[in-house]
Image (spheres, rainbow, N blue to C red):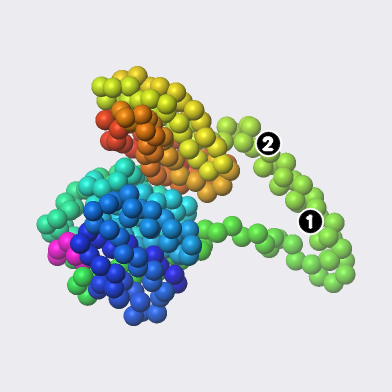
Amino acid sequence: MKILFLHGWQSVPGSVKPTYLKDHGHEVLNPALPDDDFNAAVRIAQAEFDQHHPDVIVGSSRGGAVAMNISSGNTPLVLMCPAWKHWGTARAVKPGTAILHSKADETIPFAESQELLRNGGLPETDLIVIGYEHRLADPDSLAKMMEAVEKAVSQRQMTKTDTRRPWVTPKGLGGVLAFLLILPLIDLFGMLIALVMPILHGGGILVTVTNSGNQPLSSVRLHVTGAGYDIGDITAGNTTETIVRATGESGLEIEIMDTNGRSKRLNAGGYFESGYRGTIRVSIKDGVIDQNEQNIHIR
């Protein structure tokens, strides 16, 4: 298994947690992330992900915030005491994310992980209560981390599309001929369904953006894989709705113009693909996402 491990603030590569994963036979990518430049840390993590395509991403504390702010498609996340309220703009996580946190954490309040769970609409079972302090470096916490990593990867593999056709069981020459005759019809039928169903059922994600601040949001643009949607300006207190459709694995990014006239992207998170349906409701205040509610499902 290939694991991208993103360490926390004032930590270094090769610490207890990535070493534990490595000692259990896994390939661990553990880049050094600068403490004084969060955007640079995100860029480094994104480059590691794009180059190596890990099976799972583990983020510890500030590293959890870094993990939430990179584009990682459907690669599962395991977050340990994530400091998402202190760094970055992402305010929700994708389905299947596991969060480990101690109720006795003296650095990142346990309630922040409970809030993160609600923001993403995740089940309570995705929040694993373990440990007795922030580092989660005790034997029980390390074992739970390993269990969460292996479970996340296993669930991802189970949800991959099975392209086999188990209902076709050729027997002898007649079965082979029947299979060859039916196969094009099956593919044609599937193609027609793929074309017609989005029209009949309105496939797409309805994105609602609310400006909850006192200043207008300028030059708002929504970004998903394969498409961009110009919204324009949203005055203070107003809301806009747009249906977005991605061409592949995607999350949602919201581009705005800051007070200095510079483009700024906010990572609204989420995970969807072509044909998915649902809603994402985002509230932006003072250039930061302050509320994020998601309800996304397969068509």
Q: Name above or below for residue 290 compared with residue 82.
A: above
Compare residues 167 and 235 and report the one nearer the observer: 235
Q: Give the quadrant of residue 64.
A: bottom left
Q: What residue is shown with label 1?
A: 183
Judged left or right of residue 8, residue 248 is right
* Residue sitting at x 22%, y 75%: 139
Compare residues 196 and 212 and report the one nearer the observer: 212
Q: What residue is shown with label 2?
A: 196
Magenta segment boundaries in residue numbering: 132-136
Amino acid on which disc 1 is placed: Leu
Compare residues 152 and 249 and report the one nearer the observer: 249
Is-magenta flag for residue 135?
yes
Distance, label 2 to label 1, CA atoms, is 20 Å
* Residue sitting at x 36%, y 29%: 261
Circles 2 and 1 in contact, beta carbons < 8 Å: no
Judged left or right of residue 90, residue 153 is right
Q: Name above or below for residue 156 compared with residue 224.
A: below
Judged left or right of residue 250, residue 194 is right
Amino acid on which disc 2 is placed: Val
